[in-house]
Image (cartoon, rainbow, N blue to C red):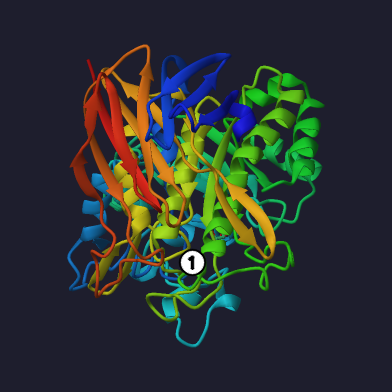
Amino acid sequence: MKNRREFVQTALAGAAGIAFFRYAGISVAAPQGFDSRVEILLDESMGSISPNLYGHFTEHLGGTIYDGVWVGTKSKVPNIGGIRGELVDQMRKIKAPVVRYPGGCFADSYDWRDGIGPAEKRPRRTNFWIEAENDKSPASHKYEPNEFGTNEFAHFCKLIGAEPYLAANVRSLPASEFYRWVEYCNSPAGSTTLAEERAKSGSPQPYNVRYWGVGNESWGCGGNFTPQEYAAEFRRYSAWVPHYGQSLSLIASGPNSDDWNWTRGFFEEMIRKGPSQFGSIYGWALHHYAWNLSRGRTTDWEKGKGDAIQFDPVDWYEILREGERVEGLILGHWQVMGEFDREHRVKLVVDEWGPWYRPGSEATPGDILEQTPTLRDAVFSAMTLDIFNRHASKLHMANCAQLINCLNSLYLAHEDRFAVTPVGHVFEMYAGHQGAESLRTIFSAPSVEYDRDGKPAAFWGLNGSASLHGKDLLVTVVNPHTTRACETEVAIRGGSANSAMAVTLSHADLHARNTFDNRESVIPKRKASVVRNGIVVHTFPAASVTALSIRLT
Ligand code: AHR
């Protein structure tokens, strides 16, 4: 991290009571008393932040769709056409830009035709995840009732003002079914038999779905392909897709974390047909989950996981370290892609990210892969969104896994109970970055030093991102230190602050979380910040996420 910022904190000059910070060879004196300094470089744009970096993901998995998004039209839970009303209200608040659906691994087992037409005639199928379900899981999680399908998903997206992103089945359906699904969604009113079927479901007008995933995790549950085989499949599935006047953005199934071979193999195979092939790929989908809390003891997927709510401070830093790897992954895959796609026509899409803990913290027993997010996950999520902002020029989209009742949920829901998790609050605090200009930032703070199984370990002391919208600057800052607040100067190079307001998410207890019975344990707090001579002076509490809204003069 530090080497990328071309920045060195040179000295803390005790005798003179002055702290010196160096940027590009210039030393700047910071007054005594400040632990840290943040500089925002107004003249150094890092690209426009696509609103879609704040995207979501919903899969027919555990309680995500049934009980989470969908309660059904006959439910006593307030709903809009079967969709949970409180979820709609919350998602409007965070300006949800895009939602990926129906999976995940489920996507490559799904026949979209099962989920259209009159609800009572839709078939019941075995869900992809059945083997992971347990005695407490309801039948709808094991045997897919298809009450929620393309029309209901399109309705959900319309209600929250988001774009749909559909993942097509490459493993178990032919390419023609992909084209037919596009036809069902996008062919003009009255034009095709499928458009008429859509109209019977209440939508004569097309859904105009722009984003389409060509498979999911095609290296694993999506077909067990080699990268070369998948490249050939991608070419075939994308060779002819009907457009109906809606430009389509096709997203190819990219690597699992640091699988460089998957990226290299795919791009190498694609270019065998010439560089023009890259014109058909909008995004290369990277997945990165932070899960290994074993501190290097194992790489076993089950044994390596930690608990979501019971952890010590070392586990706190450990999950952040695992999550922070996504920055190196963005840089690494970007470089490999560039070896073949020299003009970087293909951008990255991180369409699954988040921490993944072992079972045990489910808000609703029987909801597989459900975990209860704590303050730690809010800090993790903020750190990740800051990374995405800093790499805005390389990324088209990112989707947090998953929206509700699964993994890094923004929301937990069961029947008539609902809670916004600390992660959900972070998405609201960061919403102002969407569509703004990402600016280069320089963070200088003493690093966190701690004992990691008898060996000294360090993690950065303060980090974040900044973006500009007219005269409004949004600076988001993570203080990962579990006990130490950071008194900081936030200086703006090329401008000065007129006023500043801070919204902070923190808690004295690192394990703090929101539950159905205590929905407001971790909530953002607003407070005006001090501005002195155009510089914002702010103390970032220990274990916190802060959004500083600065009005420039
Ligand atoms: O998000 C849960 C699962 O994780 C998804 O279905 C799959 O794509 C990934 O392995």
- Does residue 445 appear to the left or right of 274 in the view shown? left
Q: Residue at x 20, y 70 (%)?
A: 77
Q: Who is closer to the viewer here, 142 or 350? A: 350
On-image quarter of the N terminus: top right
Q: Any atom of ligand 1 within 8 Å of the CB at mark 1?
A: yes
**In which image quadrant can residue 338 be found?**
top right
The residue pinned by badge 1 equals 61
**In which image quadrant can residue 269 be found?**
top right
Residue 216 appears in the rendering? no
- Does residue 246 appear to the left or right of 413 in the view shown? right
SS class of the residue under badge 1?
A: loop
Vertical relation: 85 (above or below) 241 = below
Q: Quadrant of ligand 1?
A: bottom right
Q: Position of residue 240 (x, y in %)?
A: 61, 32
Residue 190 appears in the rendering? yes
Q: Residue at x 27, y 73 (%)?
A: 516
Vertical relation: 402 (above or below) 329 = below
Q: Residue at x 21, y 72 (%)?
A: 74
Q: Position of residue 264 (x, y in %)?
A: 78, 36
Q: Who is closer to the viewer here, 14 or 542? A: 14
Vertical relation: 177 (above or below) 75 = above
State the count of labels.
1
Q: Position of residue 503 (x, y in %)?
A: 26, 43
Residue type for callout 1: Leu
